[in-house]
Amino acid sequence: MRLVCPSCGAIASAEAWTNDTAIRYFFKTLTQLPPPVLRQSLSYFGLFRQGTKALPWKRALVVARSLKELVETGTVHWQGGETRPCPAEIWGKAMETTIATGPKGLKNHNYLRHVAWEIAAELAARMEADREAARRKRRPEEEEQPVQMSEAARQAVDDLKKKWKQV
């Protein structure tokens, strides 16, 4: 695989680029991302380019590390709203949606967080609707099972009934 230097345009193999620590750590961080996120990551990082310039490796490393931290939390929070569960699959879908909308020159992951928060909200609403539908489908006898009395308790009740009939 051949890579091009964003500063000078030099072309070298991927192995040669590992001499630069920023590039080495970038690829190390990249390999630690979960598969749904990793599949979208290179296209997503392209959204951080400013104008026609290439994304510098040091900036790519910062973006990759912050993305990794964001995904590892397993939740997403957006502007005073509730914190919602957000597994890697939702992050991957949010990245795919972000790439499709094509914002250019991103400075942080706020746009991605907003998209992930919306997807997580849709998922939570769907899960709640499914739970509610399942609850409605249950028969009343399933919800309230009569408590089985012990033989001793049943005998005591029968004795009381006999006693009350005599009075």
Image (spheres, rainbow, N blue to C red):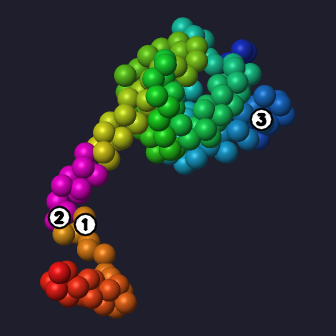
Q: Is residue 130 above or below residue 48?
A: below
Q: Is residue 129 above or below residue 16?
A: below
Give the left or right position of residue 37, taking residue 141 as reference: right
**Which secondary structure class fits the magenta region best?**
helix
| Magenta highlight on residue 155 | no
What residue sits right under mark 1 in the picture?
A: 144
The residue under the point 56% across, 33% down is 42
Q: Quadrant of the N terminus?
A: top right
Q: Is residue 106 visible?
A: yes
Residue at the top extreme? 51
The residue under the point 37% across, 34% down is 121
Give the left or right position of residue 122, taking residue 87 as reference: left
Mark 3: secondary structure:
helix
Of the two numbered discs 3 and 2 on the same chain, state the one appearing first in sequence.
3
Q: Are marks 2 and 1 in contact (CB under 8 Å)?
A: yes
Residue nearest the observer in this picture, 76 or 48: 76
What residue sits right under mark 2 in the picture?
A: 140
Q: Give the magenta range.
A: 129-140
Q: Position of residue 104 (x, y in %)?
A: 48, 14
Callout 2 amino acid? Pro
Q: Position of residue 127 (x, y in %)?
A: 32, 47
Mark 1: secondary structure:
loop
* CA separation in Å, label 3 and label 1: 59 Å
Residue nearest the observer in this picture, 154 or 85: 154
Of the two numbered discs 3 and 1 on the same chain, state the one appearing first in sequence.
3
Using a 10 Å C-alpha cutoff, classify the residue at mark 1 as few (fewer than 14 neighbours), some (14 to 19) or many (20 or more): few
Callout 3 amino acid? Tyr
What residue sits right under mark 3 in the picture?
A: 25
